[in-house]
Amino acid sequence: MSVIYLIRHGQASFGQENYDELSRIGHQQANILGESLRDRVGTFDHMVLGSMVRHKQTAEQCLNAMSQTFDQTESTVHSGWNEYDHQDILAQLGDEFKTPQSIEKYVRSQPNPKATFEKVFNKAMDRWMSGDHDADYVETWQHYQARIKKALKATIEIAKTAEKVAVFSSGGPISVVSQHLLQVEPNKVMQVNWTIVNSSVTKLVSSSSRLFLSTLNDHSHLEGRYKELITYK
């Protein structure tokens, strides 16, 4: 029996020119997670990560806090664990959503920026997931789900010879895996996605006969004195 720890990256640089890097808070979250895992898990036998910068940064920060060296040459990089292209998905709604700067300008011009962004983002995701406009996108919803399941299958193979496997990924892939294992309707994925905390841990247990979800979205390392570091994007 092996355990696969799906770790969401720390907070990214939302609204910045380069979203794909950890913010100051993101580095803190990854460090605190590592300190917690050092006591709870010890060390990982193998690391898997998506090919995004924020995945690597989270892995480095987390493992350093665990007193475990991160060596990318001894880890498995699998782009199947990458997040969807949120910028491309938002851009299809109109010119005001083409760039991070234009999105921020639009959202901040509204009476309730947070509620406005959630409404716009859900509308964009619904359009993407409907499958009615597949030609508009860099990657379709169906392809996105398929590559995540392929990445999961490859990780399960790794887990056959490694007792504890860490996967550094994003909220979307973790939500898709959770939805798949819990047999939740696919159109409910975004409801799961909105709840996945930065640097949270979702624990899967893999045996010779089955794979099941043991823990979803554990972020206890950020509760209590670190509660102000709980973020969702």
Image: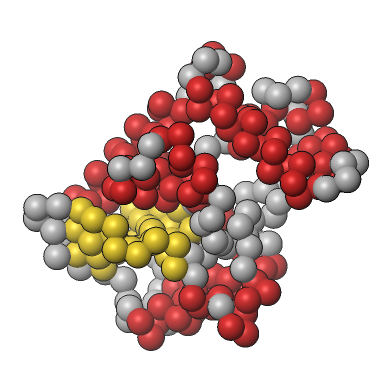
The answer to whether residue 151 is seen in the rendering is no
Instruction: Provide residue 57's location: percent of width, then percent of height.
Output: 54, 62
Instruction: Provide residue 68's location: percent of width, then percent of height.
Output: 39, 77
**Image vertical order of residue 153 relative to residue 85, above or below:** below
Is 102 on the left or on the right of 144, as rendered? right
**Image vertical order of residue 91 relative to residue 35, above or below:** above
| Quarter of the image where the C terminus is located | bottom right
The answer to whether residue 202 is seen in the rendering is yes
Comparing 182 with 82, the one in front is 182
**Image vertical order of residue 83 relative to residue 228, above or below:** above
Q: Residue at x 51, y 56 (%)?
A: 196
Comparing 217 with 111, the one in front is 111
Q: Residue at x 43, y 48 (%)?
A: 175
Is 161 on the left or on the right of 141, as rendered? left
Tell me how the rendering is colored: secondary structure
**Image vertical order of residue 85 relative to residue 95, above or below:** below
Instruction: Provide residue 130's location: percent of width, then percent of height.
Output: 50, 22
Q: Quadrant of residue 95?
A: top right
Q: Residue at x 68, y 43 (%)?
A: 118
Is 228 on the left or on the right of 207, as rendered? right
What is the count of numbered marks? 0
| Quarter of the image where the N terminus is located | bottom left
Q: Quadrant of residue 119?
A: top right
Q: Quadrant of residue 103?
A: top right
Q: Residue at x 31, y 48 (%)?
A: 182
